[in-house]
Each structure stands twice: as C-alpha cells, then as structure tokens.
Image (tube, helix red, strand yellow):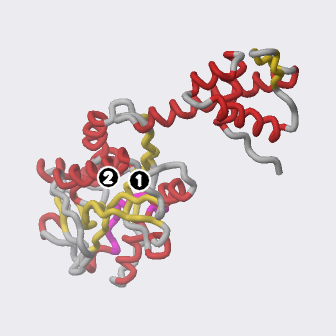
C-alpha cells in the first residue's frame, strides 16, 4: 500500500507551481528553501515521477506535474472547505441538535426548552423526532438522534445508555367530576375490572407498566380503550367514557379547572422516571450539554421533582 500524500508536500508543490521559484515559494510558506526542496523531492519519490524541471533559476512543471497540479489544487480546496466547516461547528450558536421525544414531552417540556436553547444557539439546526419510548431507543442505537427524552429504560437496555434523570411522576386514575369514583374519592378495587379504562397506546412502555401493575395486583385488564394521544384520552375521560390512567402533570390545567379529578390506582403507587438518554461512551457537545441542563430547569419550573430513587 502506497503512503498517503503529505499535505505539507502538496502545499509546497502548489506554491512552487504558482511562483515558479524555490526562493519565492519558501518565502510564501515561511520555510527555508532547503525545506521546500526536500518536500518536493519526497513528493516525487512517493509518486515515482518527476513533477518539475529546473530551467536556470526558474522552475517549470512537467506534463505529469501539470496533471498532478489539478488534483493538488482540488485536494487543497477540499481541505479548506473541511476546515471551514469544522470552524463553523466550533463557533458559539452553530452546529446541529437531533432530539427524540414523545408527543407528551413535545407538548409539555420541549417548547420552553427550545425557546431558551434558541437564544443561546441561534444558528444551531434543530431536528425533533417524535415517537414513543421504543422508537426513541432504536433511533439512539442507530445514531439517528443525539438525545432522547424518555422513560427510564429497563436494566438490559440502560446498560448501553447514559440516563440523566429529570423527574419522577406517578400514574393515577383521572376521571370526570361526576364519575362515581370522584364522589367516593377513591377507586374501589372491586370496581376496577368492570370499569372502562382509557389507556395510552398498547405498544407503549407506559401501557406495559400499567399492565404489569394490575397483574401484580391480581386485577384483570380486559375492559379498556387504547389511544395514541394523551389529549384524546383526556377528552374521552372528560365526557365520562371511562377512567384514564396517566400522570396528573399532563392534565394540570384540567385538574385546576375541576374538569378532571385525580385518584390513586391503589395502595401501592405506580411511579416512573423520566430523563434524557444518550449512547454510552459518546461525549456530548456543548450544545447537547446545554440542552440537558435546560431540560432539568424546565422540569423544575413545572414543579416536577428530580428523582434520587424510586420508592
């Protein structure tokens, strides 16, 4: 395998071809004439051909030199473009950010975060990939996104990720104020199986958590409606179509207005941890670190606590 061409030799050759003089080329490159001469000799040895002819004090390109000059100029231009691109990335406010998030996070967390982020990085290209938990983890593994706002993955998956906790929430029943459970102030255990539960997407991580919870409580989960939108779930629950199971922070406005009532699932609480995940071993860029910090600030402003441990 032939050695890779040395960029310093290419610069020396281009300068010599442009100036036609070792003395002038050396002056342009801030090198000694001897250094330029050695660079050209090494380049010709690498290529196995003569690139230059000396005619008196002048230097003329051979036919091979003329052909190689075209390639050299192209290579040097590409190197300048590459350097300029990297310089742009290191400037404050430039670069790109690819974030994955659930529709819930997109609606309740991202607007505040992105508004603050844009002020610090006005020229950063931002791409948001909405999708559920499993889809976000696939995008992370495939290198299609840099960060994902997700629920804490199970142990086998989290080993390949870094998970930065943001907050902990609790899944509860939410019902209309005229629902019988609202009047009781609780959900009677014996009535849960016969009640229509309005749940989030059957393929979601949240649905699996809810299913496992009721299975452990020896309550059959057979009478339910599944929807892919928390907003649609809230609307069905408000008109009395059943009892929703989701986190109260998602329905803060409805709870404050009294159009929904929050009740515990049972004696045992069902808690989740949210956070920002990225691939383990990947060093975050400054913009990405800033985004994570803004997520922490935004969730604190929403009154959501940073979890230390799941009880």
Is residue 272 toward the left or the right of residue 8 in the image? left
Residue at x-position 74% and y-position 33%: 40
Determine the secondary structure under disc 2: helix
Residue 201 is a magenta residue: yes
In the rendering, at what x and y percent does residue 20 appear? 71, 16
Could you say whether the residue bearing mark 1 is in a helix, strand or loop?
loop
Observer-nearest residue: 148 or 81?
A: 81
Residue 41 lies, in percent from the top left, at 77, 35
Viewer-closest of 225 and 79? 79
Q: Say whether residue 4 is left or right of residue 257.
A: right
Q: Position of residue 80 (x, y in %)?
A: 57, 29
Residue named by callout 2 = 292
Which residue is pictured at 81% across the width and 24% down the height?
A: 52
Residue segment shown in magenta: 193-204
Find the distance from the CA under tag 2 to the CA under tag 1. Answer: 10 Å
Relative height, residue 203 to residue 55 (above, below): below
Q: Are marks 2 and 1 in contact (CB under 8 Å)?
A: yes
Reply yes or no: does residue 295 show up in magenta: no
Depth order, front residue of 64/33: 33
Q: Quadrant of residue 107?
A: top left
Q: Mark 1 sits on what residue?
A: 284
Question: Residue shown at 54%/59% (left/top)?
Answer: 141
Of labels 2 and 1, the one closer to you = 1
Can the viewer see residue 172 in this picture? no
On the image, which quarter does residue 91 sit in? Answer: top left
Is residue 254 visible to the viewer in this orientation of the structure? Answer: yes
Q: Main secondary structure of the magenta part?
A: loop
Vertical side of 40 occupied by 259: above or below: below
Q: Label 2: how many residues lie within 10 Å, few (<14), some (14-19) or many (20+)?
A: many
């Amino acid at each position: 395998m032939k050695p890779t061409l040395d960029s310093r030799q290419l610069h020396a050759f281009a300068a010599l071809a442009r100036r036609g003089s070792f003395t002038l080329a050396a002056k342009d490159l801030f090198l000694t004439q001897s250094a330029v001469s050695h660079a050209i000799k090494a380049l010709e040895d690498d290529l196995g051909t003569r690139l230059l002819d000396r005619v008196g004090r002048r230097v003329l390109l051979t036919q091979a030199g003329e052909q190689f000059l075209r390639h050299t100029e192209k290579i040097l231009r590409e190197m300048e473009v590459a350097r300029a691109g990297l310089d742009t990335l290191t400037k404050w406010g430039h670069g790109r950010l690819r974030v994955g998030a659930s529709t819930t996070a997109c609606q309740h967390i991202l607007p505040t975060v992105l508004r603050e982020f844009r002020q610090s990085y006005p020229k950063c290209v931002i791409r948001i990939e909405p999708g559920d938990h499993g889809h976000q983890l696939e995008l992370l593994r495939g290198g299609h996104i840099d960060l994902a706002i997700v629920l804490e993955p199970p142990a086998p998956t989290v080993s390949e990720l870094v998970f930065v906790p943001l907050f902990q929430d609790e899944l509860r029943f939410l019902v209309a104020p005229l629902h019988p459970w609202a009047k009781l102030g609780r959900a009677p255990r014996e009535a849960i199986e016969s009640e229509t539960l309005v749940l989030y997407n059957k393929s979601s991580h949240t649905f699996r958590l809810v299913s496992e919870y009721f299975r452990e409580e020896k309550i059959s989960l057979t009478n339910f409606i599944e929807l892919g939108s928390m907003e649609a779930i809230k609307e069905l629950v408000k008109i009395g179509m059943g009892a929703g199971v989701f986190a109260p922070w998602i329905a803060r406005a409805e709870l404050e207005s009294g159009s929904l009532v929050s009740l515990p699932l049972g004696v045992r609480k069902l808690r989740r941890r949210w956070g920002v995940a990225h691939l383990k071993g990947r060093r975050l860029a400054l913009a990405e670190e800033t985004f994570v910090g803004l997520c922490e600030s935004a969730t604190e402003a929403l009154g959501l606590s940073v979890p230390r441990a799941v009880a």
